[in-house]
Amino acid sequence: MSGSATASTATWSQVYTEPRPEAREGHVSFVHAATSRIFVLGGSVASALSESATVQTSSMWCYDAAVLGAWRRVDAADAAPEPASGAAAAVVGDRAYVIGGLSLSRSSPWHSDVHCLDMSVAPATAPAPATASANPSPNTNTKSKDTATTTPVSAAASAPINGGDPVWKKCDCGRSVVPGPSGRDKAGCVALPGGRIVVFGGFGPVPAAQSSDSMGEEELSLTWFNDVHVLNAASVNPATNSVDPVWEPVELAPGSPQPAPRCACAVAMIGADDILVFGGRTNMGGRANDFWKLNVTTVTSDKGSKHIAKWTELTVSGEIPPPCSFVTAVSTGRMVVLFGGRLQDNTHTADVYVLTPNTNPATQSGFQVFCKKASPSAKKPAGRGFHTSVVISNRMAVFGEYHDELLLLDLDTL
């Protein structure tokens, strides 16, 4: 689709139900497309001890998009991720992969663990729809006593989704061969066609190999990253004939530029094979609004697979979003939708921007992108950052940043 100035309208609806997940930020969300279910995992929630304090959680909730208001809490097995915020997540087939994050219960809080959730087993029974409202109470910041933390959870809503514990697995990912990323949170993450997951950037400790041998724990040096890592989530272990994801080596293409190291940026597929990276907080001390395209090419030999990462800074025409971090991006195939974010003055926005690539070979002189700001409908939600956005059917579903309603954006109106 070529760039167009055709007007777009951000048409929102909101779903409030009882029970529902605790209001939270820094969680991950992912979708099982085959069963139209949204999963929300982890993050930070309001503390029961203080309205101004937060605690990390490992709680996971599942929303059945086919049944209005059908939230249920999912009890986790021992192999599930521990409480954390700022993890990254991507889906390959029936499996969701949760990567890294910040776990404050650890002596070394930043980590790069990989956990896999098998989402293929459908719920044994769907709970009856709870009371839901298409016109809920006004948007308010729910980092207070008025959160789902104090809402009783019914037996139906807390029932496991498959009649037993969800199937979690902690993955080694062949780190003895290719170590993968160092510990970090707020990295970007996206799944490529063919089952490989790309992880970019983030924030965390300087890797041990780059640190002074005399540096003590109290002198921990933190940094932003701009490295690229590839997890092959389609790798099969010949000994067990089962999926066994492994990290694979990545090289920067000769002469390729690189974006500034950053975290909390927006990452999504754009076109068939490319990855769009927008904004984030950089090592330059502020927030960015630059656009980059990442192409990852796989080279296979008798020694295995490696990946070549090539970056291109994009010149985007139209209406450009302001510098921001904690902004989300989703891809529909024909467009990328940006939503929300934390601005330079630390306020939050609820603006929606739509990006469309120019795919007309007759006029394309390099990769071109057009961006337009969508006009808000009467029910524009409150601004937010450190939330999550996912695509379910023809809607973008948004949850979090200390709001406990589920926002639904009609993608057909953009």
Image: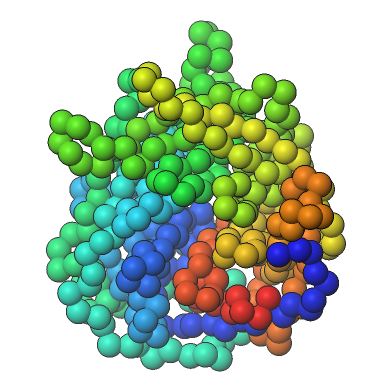
In the rendered image, residue 187, in percent from the top left (x then y), is placed at 55, 42
Residue 198 visible in the snapshot:
yes
- Indicate whether 102 appears above or below 168: above
Q: Is 56 situated left or right of 367 in this image?
A: left
Q: Residue at x 23, y 69 (%)?
A: 122
Identify the image quadrant of the C terminus. Answer: bottom right
The colour scheme is rainbow
In the rendered image, residue 104, in percent from the top left (x then y), is placed at 43, 41
Q: Residue at x 53, y 75 (%)?
A: 395
Q: Residue at x 68, y 44 (%)?
A: 293
- Indicate whether 203 appears above or below 398: above
Farthest residue, direction front: 362
**Residue 148: which quarter of the image?**
bottom left
Q: Residue at x 32, y 53 (%)?
A: 95
Front residue (pair 335, 228): 335
Front residue (pair 22, 226): 226
Front residue (pair 32, 346): 32
Q: Is 286 situated left or right of 57 in this image?
A: right
